[in-house]
Amino acid sequence: MQLYEGEEIRIGDGFPSLVRFFPGDFAKPLVVFFLGWAHLGRISHGFPGCDKKHFLAYWINRRGCPFLGTSYPIDHPIYIQLYPHFSLTNWGKMAAEIVDRFISEKGLRKDVIGISWSAAGQVIRPFNAACRSFGNKSSFPSRFRIYPRPPDPVRPHDRYEKDGKRNGVIKRLSLWFILERNTGAKSLK
C-alpha cells in the first residue's frame, strides 16, 4: 500500500508511525491527533478525492493551528511487519519523539494540544511523561466528541444542555471552545 500525498512514515522509540503534518501559525500550539483502536491516522485528515471539510485536520488547520495526525503500527499493509510487543508506553514514547522532531524541524512552540479518540485515551499518561523528557509541555482537553464538522462557535456557557434526565449534562463540548481556550482564537472565520 502506498502513502497518500503529504503522508510519511516516521520512526519513534524504534517503531514506525504513519503521520501527516499540516503547517499552521507557528505562534499557536501543535495539535496532535491520537486515533482509536485499529485505525490509521487518516481518519483525521482524509484520503485522495474526499471532501476535506469532513475531517478534523481541516477544521483545526483552518483555525491556524499546526496539526499532526499520527498512527501506531497496526496490522495494515502500510507497515512492513507486525509489532506484537508494542505497548502503551512505546506508543507514548514513539509519538513524543516524533512530535519533538516536528517541533524542532518546523520551529514550533514547545507546547502541544493532544486530541485522543476512543481507545487512544490510554496513551495520555505515557505521552505526557515522554513529552516532559523532551522538554515539551502537553495538554489534553476535557473529553469531547468529534463531529464531521464542528458546530458553529458557541459561547463557553452554551456547551451545557439539559437532557431531561439530568440537569447540566455535557452533551457536546465544541472543538471551537477547546481551541479557543488553548489558543486564544475567537472565531472559526
Image (cartoon, rainbow, N blue to C red):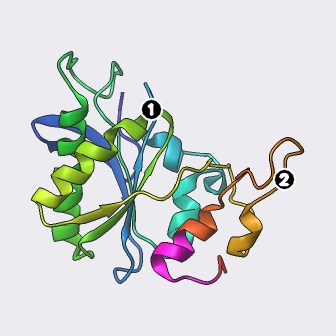
Mark 2 or mark 1: which is in front?
2
Q: Is residue 153 visible?
A: no
- Answer with the quarter of the image where residue 27 lies: bottom left
Does the magenta portion include 183?
Answer: yes
- Residue at horizontal 13%, vertical 66%? 135
Is the C terminus in the top left, top right, bottom left or bottom right quadrant? bottom right
- Residue 162, label in figure: 2
The kind of secondary structure element at disc 1 is helix
Residue 75 coordinates in the image, percent (x, y): 33, 18
Is residue 82 placed above or below 188 in the rendered structure? above
Label 2 sits on what residue type?
A: Lys
Is 158 situated left or right of 144 in this image? right
Residue 170 coordinates in the image, percent (x, y): 70, 53
The kind of secondary structure element at disc 2 is loop
Q: Kindly identify which residue carries mark 1.
A: 119
Which is nearer the N-term, disc 2 or disc 1?
A: 1
Q: Is residue 80 visible?
A: yes
Q: CA distance from mark 2 to mark 1?
A: 27 Å
Does the magenta portion include 170?
Answer: no
Q: Which residues are magenta?
A: 179-186
- Residue at horizontal 66%, vertical 61%? 174
Is 82 situated left or right of 113 in this image? left
- Answer with the quarter of the image where residue 9 lies: top left
- Residue at horizontal 55%, vertical 82%? 185
Is 21 situated left or right of 65 in this image? left
Question: Badge 1, how many Cα within 10 Å: few under 14, some, many 20+?
Answer: few
- Residue 22, label in figure: none
